[in-house]
Image (spheres, rainbow, N blue to C red):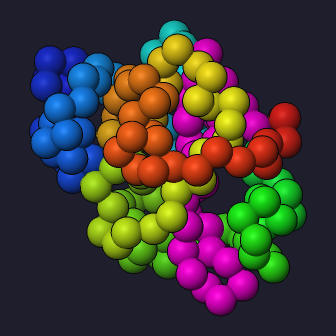
Amino acid sequence: MARKETHVSETPATAMLRRAGVVFSEHPYDYVDRGGTEESARQLGVPEHAVIKTLVMQDESARPLIVLMHGDAQVSTKNLAREIGRKKVEPCAPEVAQRHSGYQVGGTSPFGLRKPMPVFVEAGVLALDKIYINGGRRGYLVGIEPAVLVALLQAQPVHCALAD
């Protein structure tokens, strides 16, 4: 396990970031099942607000989409649906999310997805100096500037956060 500190093998997410010339920092941590962003933030010593969750959701027609949300907030699916012009938005079942993204749940990154999907980002995320987002495997975050989300993923800002 000590090797995790020095090098993390390439993932589709880090490959995409490198191809695009994005500068990012690597932040491996010990994955804890159901530990979520609270656990990763604690281990890495960063604010949970800056740890961004990648959530695979679907609309009323079962079309998948990605929502990027602060670790310490929840998504109001009603507000999200209203903002993006859909009747309904709900989380995908874990096996469906994995099929759409190509990533194991708990290790989902918005970069290097198996299928192209629209990406929506809570507007407050874009105001942060640096964010920590999944790098494509459980127990591995990458640190990037939030502007990368718009530049690389065409992420559309939305207001759908519910504070915990």
- For residue 121, which quarter of the picture? top right
- The range drawn in magenta is 47-73
Q: Nearer the viewer, residue 42 or 90?
A: 90
Magenta stretch, main secondary structure, is: strand
Q: Is residue 71 magenta?
A: yes
* Residue drawn 62% across the image and 22% down it: 127
Q: Residue furthest bottom?
A: 61
Q: What x and y, as percent, mark residue 84?
A: 72, 64
Where 14 sits versus 30, above or below? Answer: below
Image quarter hosting the N terminus? top left
* Residue drawn 51% across the image and 49% down it: 155
Image quarter hosting the C terminus? top right
Q: What x and y, as percent, mark residue 60?
A: 72, 84
Where 35 sits versus 27, above or below? Answer: below
Left or right: residue 158 versus residue 10 is right
* Residue drawn 67% across the image and 78% down it: 59
Left or right: residue 72 versus residue 112 is right
Q: Is residue 105 magenta?
A: no
- For residue 90, which quarter of the picture? bottom right
* Residue drawn 33% across the image and 61% down it: 113
Q: What x and y, as percent, mark residue 61?
A: 65, 89
